[in-house]
Amino acid sequence: MARTILIAGNWKLNPADDAGALELLRQLKNRLAPFTRTEVAVMPPFTMLHLAAQILKDSRLALGAQNLYWEATGAFTGEISAPMLKAAGCKYVIIGHSERRQLFGETDATVARKIPAALQAGLVPVVCVGETLEQRESGQAQAVVHEQVRQALSGLPEAALRTLVIAYEPVWAIGTGRNATPEQAQEMHRFIRDLITDTTSAAVADELRILYGGSVKPDNARDLLGRPDIDGALVGGASLKAETFAAIVESGEIVS
Ligand code: 13P
């Protein structure tokens, strides 16, 4: 089946202030208006979500958040819940980004708790998986990703799995300028899709979108997005400039 390409911009802890966010959002809205075949989402920091929702209403750009907590309310200082993100206008939420796993102690177990919370609130989880350089060089890349996917998806009903998005982000390719080759990315995406076929069904595996993330730039996007199992991109650095992000979206349009 033809899966609609999704290009999502993970802004991480950027830009420095609301004025920067406002400027970027306005530029994106203008530049992306002509593109209609590709789905596009931006994922700003929490405090910029309301502002972004206002600017993006009446546009084709969807909004996403970068993290959530699995409880809806309660004594959990510093946390943000799935219903809060939904109310702020989010459609997507990133779960288990490698920076959260490496810097903030997230594990496969916390990822597995966050996914149902997101789904219950009507958010689409963008579940991140990916191996470190050490794991790839010692031949464990597939085993690591297999375990991350297995733990993230176990116990989820088939209907939920169909809507979910997985992002394969090899840790060694994030923010390094060193992207996985289209062949390496395609190979891992195929591996993930086969895994989902084996554990659920070919129909679910065929519907579920698998994004690639890690140094996606205008000059490599088209080759990556042209591969049969790469259904979009989760873009970090290059999503912070309207020009580069729009060029990546344009690559998505060309291959759609
Ligand atoms: P870069 O595109 O900056 O490598 O970041 C990728 C990423 O982590 C997206 O979530």
Image: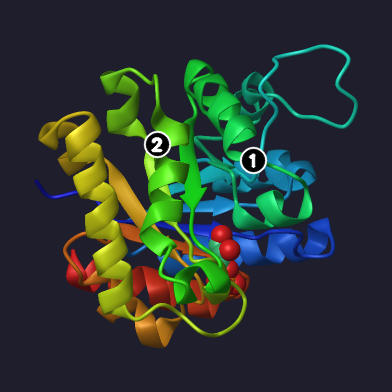
Query: What's the amino acid at mark 1?
Result: Thr
The Cα–Cα distance between marks 1 and 2, rounded to whole angstroms, is 13 Å
Find residue 11 and report its image quarter.
Answer: bottom right
For this rendering, which residue is in front, 208 or 219?
208
Report the residue at 86% width, 21% height from top. 76
Q: Where is residue 135 in the image (x, y as percent from the top left)?
A: 51, 67
Here the colouring is rainbow
Within 10 angstroms of label 1, few (less than 14), some, or many (20 or more) residues? Answer: some
Query: What's the amino acid at mark 2?
Result: Arg
Figure quadrant, ligand 1: bottom right
Secondary structure of the residue carrying tag 2 is helix
Report the residue at 90% width, 26% height from top. 77
Decide: is 124 above or below 194. Answer: above
**Precedes in sequence: disc 1 or disc 2:** 1
CB of mark 1 near ligand 1 (< 8 Å): no
Q: Is residue 24 left or right of residue 112?
A: right
Q: Name the residue under label 1.
A: 107
CB of mark 2 near ligand 1 (< 8 Å): no
Find residue 186 and report its image quarter.
Answer: bottom left
Q: Where is residue 175 in the image (x, y as percent from the top left)?
A: 62, 76
Q: Name the residue under label 2.
A: 150
Within 10 angstroms of label 2, few (less than 14), some, or many (20 or more) residues? Answer: some
**Quarter of the picture holding the C terminus:** bottom left
Q: Is residue 104 left or right of residue 190?
A: right
